[in-house]
Image (cartoon, coloured by chain):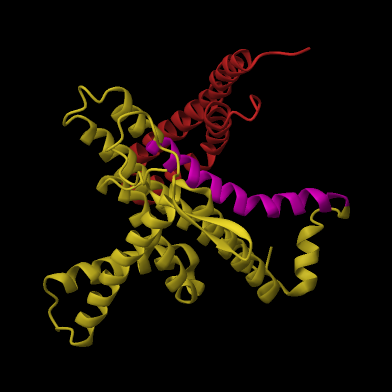
Amino acid sequence: MDTAIMLSAQKEVDFMIHGVFSYNFFGHEVWITTSHVCLLIVLITLMIFFFVGGRIFKHADEIPSGFQNIVELIVEFLDGIVNSTMGKYGKNFRNYIGTIFIFILFSNISGLLGLRPPTADYGTTLPLGLATFTLIFVNKIRYQKVSGFLKGLMDPWPFWLPINIIGDCAVPISLSLRLFANILSGTAIMALIYGLLSKIAFFWPAALHVYFDLFSGAIQTYVFCMLTMTYIADAMNTEG
Amino acid sequence: MEFNTEFIKGCSAIGAGLALIAGIGPGVGQGIAAGHAASAVGRNPGAKGDITSTMLLGQAVAETTGLYGLLVGMILIFVQPLAK
């Protein structure tokens, strides 16, 4: 089993997840795959970024300069989109939205660095969807109480209960599948170009990288966070 | 009736191609959304930011059905569940 982390290093069309090594976990054979390795690289990069950012803000200047400027720009942008979407509840969710925004964005654009994007693995996006689902459920119970939750399920008639349950359970699946399929399609197209057109693939795939990795990745990140905020704000809306 | 594996693989490829016809719907829908957003910006250029973010959100939701078709096609070609 070869350890093909680098997409562009392949000679034939290959964008699948490969196993790096396997070990026994209480009798089960568990594989560490390229997704785990890429995820680890992304996480270490983010940790270094957060560590440096935190150290700079220990002794921040009145007039920001250099790296402090970048960090303030990112934080202000994230606070802006959370506050404009969720209004007065925004300050409770800045941390969660900011974290998943930066994580998904870095994962999506890691295709630029030759990694297989970790979000092109359904095992990465489904937990993100389930975390959002848990937040929606908890906030619905907290703000609408159990009676309001049950009333919402039987809206407009009790007859509609199964349809409402299916609609609620479809939220994490559609959220995670949307992110997964978008990134997977970009990865597949880049693998097809590097695999089938490897003889003439000089320079011009860079334009496709800009579209599939930067543009599509940023749009999908924005959409995932916007939908998460919209669903949570909808769950906290006690009037309707 | 028994079919050999090559025949099933070929039929899977045809099925994958047919599944990607699902891409027509999101294309038309996203085009309509972008067209209306463009005319909205023309009428009210001050609200360009809000219009753009609303358009992108709606387009991303409309895209979902096309992506389901894409996933079906990818599974038919690369996982080949029918040829096993």
Residue A205 vertical position relative to residue B46 in the rendered view, above or below: above
Can you give x and y, in whole percent of width and height, for residue A216 in the image? Answer: 36, 42
Residue B57 vertical position relative to residue A240 in the rendered view, above or below: above
Residue A231 vertical position relative to residue B37 in the rendered view, above or below: below
Q: Is residue A100 left or right of residue B46?
A: right
Can you give x and y, in whole percent of width and height, for residue A92 in the image? Answer: 49, 76
Residue drawn at (30%, 38%) of the image: A211
> Which color was chain A given?
yellow
Can you give x and y, in whole percent of width and height, for residue A209 in the image? Answer: 27, 38
Quadrant where the N terminus of chain A sits is top left
Q: How many marks?
A: 0
Q: Main secondary structure of the magenta part?
A: helix
Assess whether residue A9 is covered by the magenta stretch: no
The chain letter of the red chain reads B
Q: Quick one: A70 or B41, which is closer to the camera?
A: A70
Residue drawn at (54%, 50%) of the image: A176
Can you give x and y, in whole percent of width and height, for residue A61 in the image? Answer: 14, 83
Rendered image quadrant of residue A168: bottom right
* Residue A208 visible in rendering: yes
Q: Quick one: A148 or B76, which is closer to the camera?
A: B76
Q: Quick one: A34 or A85, which is closer to the camera?
A: A34
Residue drawn at (40%, 37%) of the image: A15
Rendered image quadrant of residue A69: bottom left
- Image: magenta residue range: A159-187
